[in-house]
């Protein structure tokens, strides 16, 4: 007798079911359709659990993100409706201009903290050093993203031109920021 018998279910173990089935007149030790269905379902669940276990190790951040978003959506639903976060994300402007603006805003937003950490530098040295630092990080991230898109075989047409436009806008933004921090160039034009 199984310790975990539930009402309406037999308390016999699978082996006991098989022995009963084989002793029943006219039955050839074949599981019933219900038994096959239950076994197939259990096997599918085991495979799913194994896949989740293996996949979770490889995609732990994705799993964490998905779980967090699902729970936040659940908690926000009474006030903001179902899937509030996804709805907000779909409203985000993903044009080249808006993407470049977000990149510039986030990266250049650290300049004041950088300047405070480097009082030994002149303003020109600080600005040049800072822009070189964030520009290098941007270029590395851009190249990695480009390689991923190329690996997925989606880097072409509008996607390629869109990311190239974003790249150019970010570079121009870094150049403009640097120009605003450098002393105005004085020209000595004798023909003036």
Image: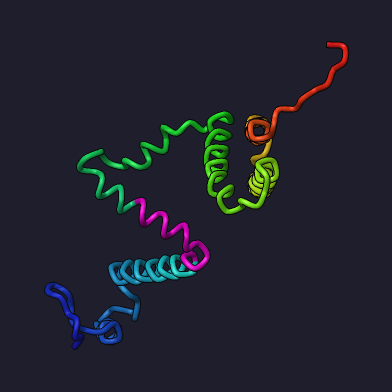
Q: Main secondary structure of the magenta part?
A: helix
Q: Is residue 168 visible?
A: no
- Residue 157 spot, x, y in % from top left: 67, 31
Q: Name the residue at the right extreme.
A: 190
Q: Nearer the viewer, residue 132 or 32?
A: 132
The answer to if 62 sits in the magenta stretch is yes
Magenta segment range? 55-69
The answer to whether residue 18 is left or right of residue 47 is: left
62 lies above or below 80: below
Against 161, residue 84 (above or below) is: below
- Residue 167 pos. (x, y %): 66, 36
- At a point 85% along the width and 17% down the height, the residue shown is 189
Seen at 26% across and 49% down, the residue is 74
x%, y% of residue 67? 36, 57
Nearer-the-camera pick, 177 or 54: 177
Q: Residue at x 18, y 88 (%)?
A: 1
Query: Is 30 a magenta residue?
Result: no
Which residue occupies 70% across, 45% down?
125
Which image quadrant for residue 88?
top left
Q: Is residue 137 left or right of residue 81?
A: right
């Amino acid at each position: 007798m199984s310790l975990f018998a539930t009402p309406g279910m037999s308390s016999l173990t699978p082996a006991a079911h098989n022995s009963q089935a084989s002793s029943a007149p006219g039955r050839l030790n074949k599981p019933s359709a219900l038994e096959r269905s239950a076994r197939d379902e259990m096997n599918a669940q085991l495979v799913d659990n194994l896949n989740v276990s293996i996949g979770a190790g490889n995609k732990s951040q994705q799993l964490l993100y998905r779980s967090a978003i699902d729970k936040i959506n659940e908690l926000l639903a009474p006030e903001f409706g179902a899937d509030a976060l996804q709805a907000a994300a779909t409203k985000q402007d993903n044009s080249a201009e808006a993407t470049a603006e977000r990149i510039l805003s986030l990266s250049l937003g650290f300049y004041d903290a950088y300047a405070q950490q480097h009082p030994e530098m002149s303003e020109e040295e600080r600005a040049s050093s800072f822009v070189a630092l964030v520009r290098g990080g941007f270029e590395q991230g851009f190249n990695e993203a480009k390689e991923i898109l190329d690996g997925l075989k989606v880097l072409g047409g509008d996607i390629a031109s869109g990311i190239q436009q974003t790249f150019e806008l970010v570079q121009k933004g870094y150049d403009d920021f640097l120009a605003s921090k450098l002393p105005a160039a004085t020209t000595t034009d004798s023909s003036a």
